[in-house]
């Protein structure tokens, strides 16, 4: 079996089962997802933070499930690699999770990630209350997702370390969510060092892929993650953060200098924008079909119906 002959969900499942660390990069639009694919990442992470920031609203369940779905689906349509969508806490209770699973699967999303916090959630790195859902409640959400999906990959995100509840609580939740039917666990941490996620992986006594998001412990390497047996690393918000800095720098220079003369050489050529949009392929296809149309019209005029 090869990746080209299976669905995107099964491809994601196969990637999670590999011994090497699968690499995912965050995106917030069809264009950024395409750039992720062209950079040879394995998976697009449809980032809740990035999607919210692209709409200039906080990552705190301000956007509706439909708005997040539309953004993720546009990414899925633009790329051939799997899209794993950040679905916050599932947009509500068990019933909302069931609707989320059905909706995202219909739109071609390979997998969804749901975190064990109360709705509405707050971004894990934001100052403010990080309120965990009871294990019974969240295990029910994961079970509902696992039962209702056809092939969709279900990732259960554990926020116990973010909420200051410690390793034992994180391990307890991991075991529960695996038993409820999760395909993978995501252990989240805001520590500047990877020690606590290493401890989680080393002490987890369940055979299930484990995903990490090395945002704050950014010095960790893929080799180190592989040594501890992690299945995937998600670089969740780097596309957004690098884009913001680039736009700020370019805008400031144009405003200060009153000309684009000194920035033009640093910008992406318009021809590259056209390529990413698929303009050249579109024009080629247009000419092909119009050429056939001209041939058909000429044959008809001569009384030779093809």
Image (spheres, helix red, strand yellow):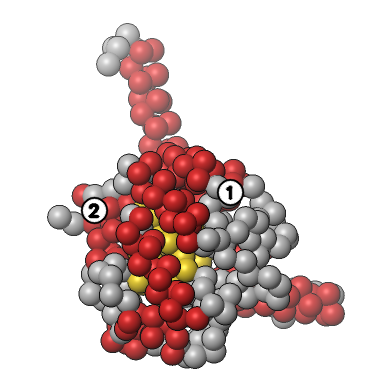
Percent position (x, y) of residue 289? 39, 32
**Residue 165 image offset from top left, x and y in percent:** 54, 77
Q: Residue at x 29, y 48 (%)?
A: 7
Q: Earlier in the sequence, mark 1 or mark 2?
A: 2
Is disc 1 placed on a helix, strand or loop? Answer: loop
Q: Residue 225: where, in percent of width, then height?
A: 35, 83
In the drawing, does residue 23 fall left or right of residue 242?
left
Q: Which residue is mark 1?
A: 92
Front residue (pair 137, 48):
137
Q: Nearer the viewer, residue 254 or 29?
A: 29
Assess disc 2: are there few (<14), some (14-19) or many (≥20) residues with their C-alpha within 10 Å of its C-alpha.
few
User: Which residue does the image show at 43% across and 67% down from the upper left?
Assistant: 173
User: Relative to 53, is 101 on the left or the right?
Assistant: left
247 over 8 or under it: above or below: below
Identify the image quadrant of residue 175. Answer: bottom left
Q: From the image, which quarter does the C terminus lie in?
A: top left
Between 304 and 57, the one nearer to me in the picture? 57
Q: What residue sits 58% from the left and 50% below the top? A: 91
Depth order, front residue of 306/146:
146
Tell me, for residue 4, which label it has, or none. 2
């Amino acid at each position: 079996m090869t990746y080209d002959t299976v669905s995107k969900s099964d491809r994601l499942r196969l990637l999670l089962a590999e011994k090497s660390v699968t690499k995912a990069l965050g995106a917030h639009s069809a264009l950024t997802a395409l750039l992720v694919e062209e950079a040879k990442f394995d998976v697009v992470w449809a980032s809740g933070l990035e999607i919210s920031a692209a709409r200039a609203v906080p990552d705190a369940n301000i956007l509706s499930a439909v708005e997040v779905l539309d953004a993720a689906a546009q990414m899925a349509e633009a790329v051939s690699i799997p899209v794993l969508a950040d679905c916050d806490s599932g947009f509500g209770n068990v019933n909302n999770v069931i609707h989320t699973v059905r909706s995202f699967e219909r739109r071609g999303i390979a997998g969804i990630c749901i975190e064990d916090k109360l709705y509405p959630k707050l971004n894990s790195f934001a100052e403010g209350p990080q309120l965990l859902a009871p294990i019974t409640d969240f295990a029910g959400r994961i079970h509902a997702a696992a039962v209702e999906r056809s092939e969709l990959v279900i990732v259960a995100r554990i926020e116990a370390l973010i909420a200051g509840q410690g390793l034992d609580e994180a391990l307890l939740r991991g075991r529960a969510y695996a038993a409820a039917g999760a395909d993978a666990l995501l252990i989240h941490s805001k520590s500047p060092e990877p020690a606590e996620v290493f401890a989680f992986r080393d002490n987890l006594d369940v055979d299930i892929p484990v995903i990490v998001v090395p945002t704050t412990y950014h010095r960790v390497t893929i080799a180190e993650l592989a040594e501890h047996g992690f299945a995937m690393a998600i670089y969740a918000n780097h596309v957004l953060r690098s884009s913001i800095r680039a736009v700020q720098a370019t805008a400031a220079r144009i405003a200060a200098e009153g000309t684009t003369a000194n920035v033009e050489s640093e910008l992406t050529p318009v021809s590259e924008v056209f390529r990413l949009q698929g303009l050249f392929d579109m024009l080629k296809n247009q000419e092909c079909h119009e050429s056939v149309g001209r041939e058909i019209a000429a044959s008809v005029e001569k009384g030779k119906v093809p």
